[in-house]
Image (cartoon, rainbow, N blue to C red):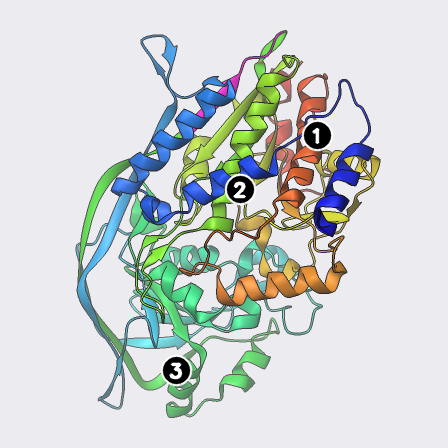
Amino acid sequence: MNSRLCAAIALVVSAPVFAHDPPRFDPQRLSEEVKTLSSDAFEGRGPATPAEQRTVDYVIKQMQAAGLQPGGELKAGKRTWTQPVPLLRADIVGTPKLAFAHDGKPQVLEQGKDIAVRAALDGSTKVAIDKVPVVFAGYGVTAPERDWNDFKDLDVRGKLVLVLINDPDFESGSGDFGGKAMTYYGRWTYKYEEAARRGAAGLLVIHETAPASYGWATVKNSNTNTMFDIVRKQPKASHSQLEGWIQRDVAANLLKQAGLDFDSLKQQARTRDFKAVQLDGVTFSAHYNVRSQVITSRNVVGRIEGSSHPDETVIYSAHWDHLGVGAPDAKGDRIYNGAVDNATGTAALIEMGRAFARGPKPQRSVVFLNVTAEEKGLLGSEYYAANPLYPLATTVAVLNMDALSPFGPARNFTTSGNAASDLLDKLVADGKAMGLVFTPDPHLEAGYFFRSDHFPFAKRGVPALSFGSGNDWVDGGVAAGEAEQAAYTRDRYHQPADEWQANWPFTGLAQDLQLLYRVGSELANSRDWPGWPRDSEFRAARESSAGQRQ
């Protein structure tokens, strides 16, 4: 018996009794489910592909076998297993023609190498941007509460905007944006939205690995394939015609041609005195067709109805989708299997459902929500939160599981981001009771709080968090845990290499699930309503529905 397995058994055996004996989660079953979901037969689990049907059928079958009941939309008075999620699907037709020009001399850009533009989500069927002015707008932030405006009086309507990724505080670790902890202003989604609000023809985020928290391969693979968005009444209010990323060196060379220095401008952009600057003699052109249609993907939903408070709901969530089939890697592999991201979370969701189905029936209902299109911008969870099957006012909490560890057990655990809440306090206390230490997100600069499926719930006031496996491994300590995370981010995240490995023990995930079960079970068998602290940006939304909770 290896040392990791011994340590895992010791931790499981030493876990305290609460309400009833804690469940045991089977590492072998977790491994088999991850192996199946991330096999080539599932073709990377792309939404709106033949692989979606395969994935949905598999998850439903596993939920049924686990003992769950359908928790999806009502049809003829009965719950089904799914919630339809209408999405706008968009693809670039052929190879886009993209170029800067300086004093009329063109500089052709190669899609995927120099630049990564997305299929238009503003409703356009043809992108025709011809020789528009180019503006460098710092971090692209307009934050009145911080007395911050990168655009000042510069009108960017009809122009291409270049912006830096992350917040102005990232480089120094201190300032008006909370230091290293990324705010929503640092997310590329915000930067696209701000460009649309200002009427820009397009926006390109300048990629740098450290402030983005991932390399160019991740950018390319996430932005040059099929794009999705929820169906919007006014899509142009949220999206410019062109959205994408550009390599740092390409942007720096362009600025140099206009007589500007990238590093100097970046330094200036860290201050509120910065003013956006138009690049003299520089223009941008983009021409390509877009094929778009409204398709329907699906969230998969299982449920256990509460015995005494069935209208109150605890949600466990995870996303089933990944990137599907895309550009080949150096080995020619085109299937983005998504083993860690997020076959682990989907397997965890199935096994969590099994544990609740086999245990005492909870007083409150428990929902197991397997959402679609997370990789396209949290779209499945955003749709559910905007169109909840069970009222958000009486949703007690959301515990999200995304990209969990398939390795051995850790002495600690974490969450995505640092948003304080009663739910986080409970997770920390329950972890302590199991002998586990809470380690705050060690990479707040990466903005993970805004990158997981709990966020659409949190911004609507529902106490929500996304759980993260620990980095202080029983076998190898922090050095081993951090080294593996760095290797995963560099070599496998959003790449075809994210594949199931036969030597993964999954004993750490089994331990993680004991903690998550404990938190959810205690909430489901109590009258507790976790909340947000007074200074939380999510508190007001939660308090507005207080009258609907007993």
**Between disc 1 and disc 2, whose residue precedes?**
2
Residue 546 in the figure: left or right of residue 412:
left
Q: Give the amino acid type for the residue marked by disc 1 in the picture.
A: Val
Q: Give the amino acid type for the residue marked by disc 2 in the picture.
A: Ser
Q: Secondary structure at mark 2?
A: helix
**Between disc 3 and disc 1, whose residue precedes?**
3
Q: Quadrant of the C terminus?
A: top right
Of tags 3 and 1, the one toward the viewer is 1
Q: Residue at x 64, y 68 (%)?
A: 169
The picture quadrant where one finds residue 186 is bottom right
Q: Give the amino acid type for the residue marked by disc 3 in the picture.
A: Val
**Residue topped by disc 2:** 31
Tell me if residue 20 comes above or below residue 437 in the rendering.
above
Marks 1/2: CA distance?
Answer: 23 Å
The picture quadrant where one finds residue 314 is top right
Q: Is residue 502 visible?
A: yes
Rendered location of residue 78, percent (x, y): 37, 10
> Badge 3, how many Cα within 10 Å: few under 14, some, many 20+?
some
**Residue topped by disc 3:** 250
> Badge 1, how many Cα within 10 Å: few under 14, some, many 20+?
many
Tell me if residue 310 comes above or below residue 11 in the rendering.
above
**Residue topped by disc 1:** 519
State yes or no: residue 302 in magenta: yes
Q: Is residue 545 visible?
A: no
Rendered location of residue 34, percent (x, y): 48, 42
Residue 359 in the figure: left or right of residue 263:
right
Q: What segment carries the magenta color?
A: 300-307
